[in-house]
Image (spheres, rainbow, N blue to C red):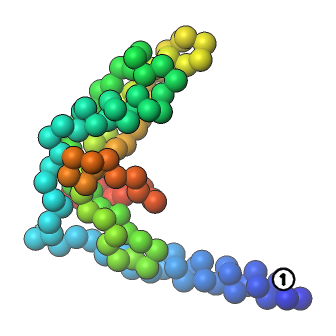
């Protein structure tokens, strides 16, 4: 009986959290400085994570303004994002094909978000 009660309370809390209104940055919001050396930072990040970083072929777009909300709906982080496609060799030495990656920046440093940030249009 208590397990059913706890499950009901937990599902209610999750439902209420999902309904929290999400804030959006105002037109005057400051996103900080746009990253200039983002390609170097992305290459360094991939070098730490890929099996064969020397084989990586990277195609990146231009930085865009992005933000992240916390669970209560308020803005947690504002900065810039960069969408890339990366193709690198796997353990067998074969290229895996271009895969999408997104990188987020606070100034020149890569920011690791808890959730997927939203793009500011």
Q: Residue 106 at what x, y percent from top left?
A: 25, 54
Specify few, some or many for label 1: CA neighbours under 10 Å numbering under 14, 14-19, or 20 or more. few
Determine if residue 1 is in view: yes
Q: Nearer the viewer, residue 61 or 42?
A: 42
> Which residue is at 31% across, 35% downward?
42
In the rendered image, the vertical position of residue 12 relative to residue 117, given as above or below: below
Which image quarter: residue 74? Answer: bottom left
Looking at the picture, does residue 107 appear above or below residue 55?
below
- Residue 101 position, x and y percent, is 40, 38
Corner quadrant of residue 5:
bottom right
Is residue 21 placed above or below 35 in the rendered structure?
A: below
Q: Is residue 92 above or below residue 45?
A: above
Q: Report the residue marked by disc 1.
A: 3
Residue at image location 15% in from the left, 69% down from the top: 29
Q: Secondary structure at mark 1?
A: helix
Q: Residue furthest right?
A: 1
Q: Please identify the quadrant where the C terminus is shown.
A: bottom left
Give the side of residue 26 with respect to residue 22, left or right. left
């Amino acid at each position: 009986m208590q397990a059913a009660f706890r499950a009901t309370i937990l599902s209610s809390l999750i439902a209420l959290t999902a309904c929290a209104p999400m804030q959006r940055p105002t037109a005057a919001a400051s996103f900080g400085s746009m990253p200039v050396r983002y390609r170097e930072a992305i290459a360094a990040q991939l070098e730490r994570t890929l099996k064969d970083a020397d084989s990586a072929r990277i195609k990146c777009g231009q930085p865009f303004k992005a933000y992240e909300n916390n669970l209560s709906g308020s803005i947690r982080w504002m900065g810039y994002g960069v969408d890339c496609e990366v193709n690198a060799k796997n353990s067998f030495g074969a290229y895996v094909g271009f895969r999408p990656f997104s990188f987020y920046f606070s100034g020149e440093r890569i920011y690791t978000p808890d959730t997927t940030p939203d793009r500011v249009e």
